[in-house]
Amino acid sequence: DAKTTQPNSMESNEEEPVHLPCNHSTISGTDYIHWYRQLPSQGPEYVIHGLTSNVNNRMASLAIAEDRKSSTLILHRATLRDAAVYYCILRPNYGGSQGNLIFGKGTKLSVKP
Amino acid sequence: EPEVTQTPSHQVTQMGQEVILRCVPISNHLYFYWYRQILGQKVEFLVSFYNNEISEKSEIFDDQFSVERPDGSNFTLKIRSTKLEDSAMYFCASSYSGTYNEQFFGPGTRLTVL
């Protein structure tokens, strides 16, 4: 499975934007970039995913570099509820894969009031 | 909004005992997964299940583990003879398709083996 690299931790102030980086220099052309997060004492939660183009949904935006070797998850206005561990995960897009998620250590985001 | 549910929320057992962890996936989902997370460590994939059979399994999922979808709604993980190192949070997840759709996770079952 292709590997991702994320900072161990980041801090943000409440109501400010947060940019969470992820490097995936060995990404293949068939890999989707997925982001999940895990709030304290909860199961992981899907955030967003993309292939080549930038993506927006109600939770966040995903900016993907042109060469696809890195991506950035953007939370437009951090709230205290966004404090979580954020995981950047590559998922292969081919018929033989059943799509199990390979989690790394992720980035622990702290949000200060 | 539909959600994945898991029971029990906390299970305490003695080493060597069998445990069954239960999950009710989202009703129209076709793919089912078990993951575990030892305290302070990464979430680890255990097994995926589709069309009433195991699709993929990790090295962790040895002969002590089994999965079943006994009645079309429940999805269970059985550990035949628990070991101390099986103590962890166990998360069930489901998705409509294998690769293209997001996985929805349950709240987890905390298994404590004494």
Image: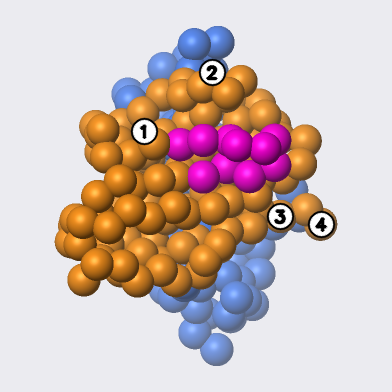
Chain colours: A blue, B orange
Q: Which residues are magenta?
A: B67-76
Give me the chain letter of mark 2. Answer: A
Type of amino acid under label 3: Glu
**In the rendering, at what x and y percent does residue A5 appear?**
31, 43
Q: Earlier in the sequence, mark 1 or mark 2?
A: 1
Give me the chain letter of mark 1. Answer: A
Residue A24, which numbered label?
1
* Residue named by callout 4: B1
Q: Is residue A97 shown above or below B77?
A: above
Type of amino acid under label 4: Glu
Residue B34 in the magenta stretch? The answer is: no
* Residue named by callout 3: B3
A22 vs B15, nearest the viewer: B15
Type of amino acid under label 1: His
* The N terminus of chain B, quarter of image: bottom right
How many numbered marks are there?
4
**In the rendering, at what x and y percent does residue A69 appear?**
40, 29
Give me the chain letter of mark 3. Answer: B
The CA distance from mark 1 to mark 3 is 31 Å
**In the rendering, at what x and y percent does residue A10 appear?**
38, 67
Q: Are marks 4 and 2 on the same chain?
A: no
**Identity of the residue furthest to the right in this view:** B1
* The C terminus of chain B, quarter of image: bottom left
**Identity of the residue furthest to the top in this view:** A95
The CA distance from mark 1 to mark 2 is 16 Å
* Residue named by callout 2: A93
Can you tell which of label 1 and label 2 is closer to the viewer?
A: 2
